[in-house]
Amino acid sequence: MTKVVGTRLKRKEDPKLITGHGSFADDIQLPGMLHAAVLRSPHAHAVIKKINVEEALKVPGVVAIYTGKDLEGKIGPVPTSWYVPDCDLKEAPQYPLAIDRVRYVGDGVALVIAEGRYAVKDAMYLIDVEYETLSPAVGQKESLKDNAPLVHDDIENNLAFHWKAGTVPEEVCEKAEASVKQSFYVQRVAPSPIETRAAIGRYNPGTGELTLWCTSQNPHIHRMVLSEVLDITEAKLRVISPDMGGGFGGKIGVYPDEALVGFAARDLCRPVKWIEERSEHFTAANFGRDEVIDVEIYGQKDGTITALRVTNTHNVGAYLSTMGPGVSTIDFGLMITGIYKIPYASCETFGVYTNTTPTDAYRGAGKPESTYQIERAIDLFAKEIGMDPVEIRRINMAQKEDFPFTNAQGLVYDSGDYEKPLTKALEMVDYQKFREEQKELRKRGKLVGIGFSTYVELCGFGPSKVAGGIGFQGGIWENATVRVHPRGSVTVYCGTSPHGQGHATTFGQIVSEKLGIPMDDIELVFSDTKSVSMGWGTYGSRSVAVGGSSVAIAADRVIDKAKKIAAHELEVSVEEIVFEEGIFSVKGSPSLQRTFKEIAKSANMAWNLPEGIEPSLEASSYFDPENFVYPFGTHIAVVEVDKETGQIELKRYVAVDDVGRVINPLTAEGQVHGGLAQGIGQALWEGIVYSKDGQNLTGTFMDYAMPKARFFPKFETAFTETLSPVNPIGAKGVGETGTTASTPAIMNAVMDALEPYGIKDIEMPLTPEKVWRAISESEGK
Amino acid sequence: MGNEKVNVTVKINGNEKRAEVEPRTLLAHFIRDNLGLTGTHIGCDTSQCGACTVLVDGQAVKSCTLLTVQADGSEITTVEGLGQVGNLHPMQQSFWEKHGLQCGYCTPGVMMAAVGLLQQNPNPSDEEIREGLEGVICRCTGYQFIVDAVKHAAQLMRETEAEVQLVGEERL
């Protein structure tokens, strides 16, 4: 069969995007459309005493202004979608506009609707709000203390949830010959898609249908949640994700603003558009990470790790976001042992409310943090016992024959061969040579270092049964319908919702190879709840493994039916039909054949179908995998630190990833590169910083260090291919490997470079100032 | 208020357009909202991201840094004027071939910035491309395939240039 899967095809998505014909939210213009703006709290914590909208209403073009009080009883709170069980989870209701108290800078206070983009802002700035400020709770550890200000009066100690998994017997720790304790802070970062959030609502009072275009990675989840918030049936609510300028987890969440736009469009019976500004995004869009992780690692002098104890204190912000509670518990806490056969492990997570913007899933969600702590801890342990970082990894990692491998927390990894990418990456970087050069360079006072990250990731969400068990408010199966038109072209409807990943191409490749038809004959439809019957969206590196598998199964079902029709026409039994490269032929008599197009016509015309076969050629699949998928790999960073300035130069970056079956190496490499830039960004430059009074000091791209092209060397990437046994295409997931693996690789490399100074840890991001101070302090000792 | 509308005339992608705008109208908004050319995107409000980069009188400019009135009388090229499906500019062709885009939101601005860069340096090294794209932010690609695309475009453009010169010389 012609090879389509596995080839570097150019993307189907691109012609429109490179010529300005994309259709992003702000490109949509509807007749009579109004603009919306949300006035947001400038205080982290305050009581709303009075709101005066008189002056604002005088601005020409203003149509309506709503406050929280105006909406009471008309619009419900926006709930979290992850009720993690057995952790005493306390959810505070998040009303789309604050009613009497604001709880973070960015909390919505009033919604303004006006004719025109500029008028709406003119009016917004004229709203006069009288606040009585309160002391804010900001950092998570401080906010847990008894005397900390309470974000929600009825939630003691600001404790949103307290979760535990696994136990480590005390005697195991006592028997250990060596141990290391270290606290890490995986700092708050901003997902920062270059397109901010947006929503457009249109209500038809005649049909009662509300259409909401919004920047969502999961339009069906948005529909499900917003139908409750807005009290409208799902059948009357249509959610469409238009072309989207990135997501990275920041557009998973169902947000108050989207509910407000839907409400206003219905209330005013006019289309309403809300386009978020970047500075607004830095206060009102969910952030990622913000976890203080305390680690104790125990083991023997021969390098065997015997136990791992982890405590995660997670700053969840002022409200529980859509996925927030699952990030530091399920995603993080069950993966703390990484690729290693550590017999005992425990994780205790404290979710803490603070007067800051909520945190949610960000590319990798929990796994970058878990990988960070174990990959940093194992390096520290290796240093403690004087062992090479590669050797300690080899001693402890699960071996090929251990699969399916059950980790200390009970998760069963689908397939793996950790030695394979490790060997390859070591060859690529030429490890032995590097160590020799490092010795020489150290003699000359040069600080070069190498850092490893041998990671595994939990993704491909996943089995729906498990979703139910872990409190996730959704199924996580995936849906595809392959519809063959009378003249032989095909439309495929999918429940995942791509926003840059290139699924029209990769899913198209799966269909093209299956049906033996050209890519140009295949159109893919995503991201519209009215076209796609159901689906759970794009996050957690699930799209190819779950959605792509669903597409493959539906295509197989189309072939099965088509074979029956071909057999009937060729007057043979179905068993005698072979289907290859778009041709149905009779075994042994290849001249007896029907093309795919001919069968498409036969099926749709239905003039002569076999007994019991219904007209049309279309099949659906609702694929629910039996397990998650666990991509893995080895990343190696080589850095040089300038001891005079603390500046870090990333000299080389080698990434060998095993993501199962690679559908399109070109787009897969693109995914790795993008993930790397974000993970390296977390290690070296990015970070949201709050002042003590809860102001975000890094609220624009002037203050928040977004990585630029010149920050990176050319990444050296490769794949090994260990297929997953839990889905029919053998795919794992590639979208989050880069962010999961790279942060600790960079940190380990810098710490290796700084070894001559005895520096063991520096808090991320590794700005030159921090590195310089660490060097200076150690010299002063 | 000083919001009385003023007349502006620009030549955009070869077409002359006259309009009445508020003096405070950003060029980026004028291009998108008044002229309906939505290929130019806006990604920030502090002129860092470069998604709105266009050519103004041949120079790559972030269109959020100009008021429309400041562009009065200028010639502007947006991504729509760069090339069309079936007749792609080498920069567009290269971004497609080399996978220089994922979500495609920053892409028009990045391509316009790269066109500006190649005007100044038709044969840049990888490092010069990375330095030259200082004014744009891409969150998807990690920049590697953008660098490859710009390099490839530079090569295509040099080849075309050489062909044009050759044809010119033959005519002489």
Image (tube, coloured by chain):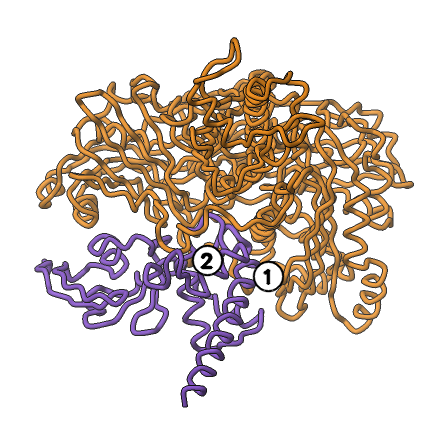
Chain colours: A orange, B purple
Residue A627 vs residue A153, the one in the foreground: A627
Residue A746 vs residue A182, the one in the foreground: A746
Q: Position of residue B130 (x, y in %)?
A: 53, 67
Amino acid at circle 1: Phe
* Circle 2/circle 1 CB separation < 8 Å: no
Q: Quadrant of residue A28?
A: top left
Q: Position of residue A332 (x, y in %)?
A: 63, 32
Relative to residue A591, is residue A247 depicted above or below?
below
Q: Quadrant of residue A97?
A: top left
Q: Dot 2: few (<14), some (14–19), or many (≥20) neighbours within 10 Å?
A: many
Relative to residue B27, is residue A5 depicted above or below?
above
Relative to residue A379, is residue B19 depicted above or below?
below
Q: Residue beneath label 2, please? A: B137
Residue A627 vs residue A544, the one in the foreground: A544
Q: Residue beneath label 1, please? A: A712
Q: Quadrant of the N terminus of chain A?
A: top right
- Total marks placed: 2
| Residue shown at the point (18%, 41%) measured from the top left | A128
Query: What chain letter is assigned to the residue under label 2?
Result: B
Q: Dot 1: few (<14), some (14–19), or many (≥20) neighbours within 10 Å?
A: many
Q: CA distance from mark 2 to mark 1?
A: 13 Å
Question: Which type of secondary structure does the marked residue at label 2 adopt?
Answer: loop
Q: Quadrant of the C terminus of chain A?
A: bottom right
Amino acid at circle 2: Ile
Q: Quadrant of residue A373?
A: top right
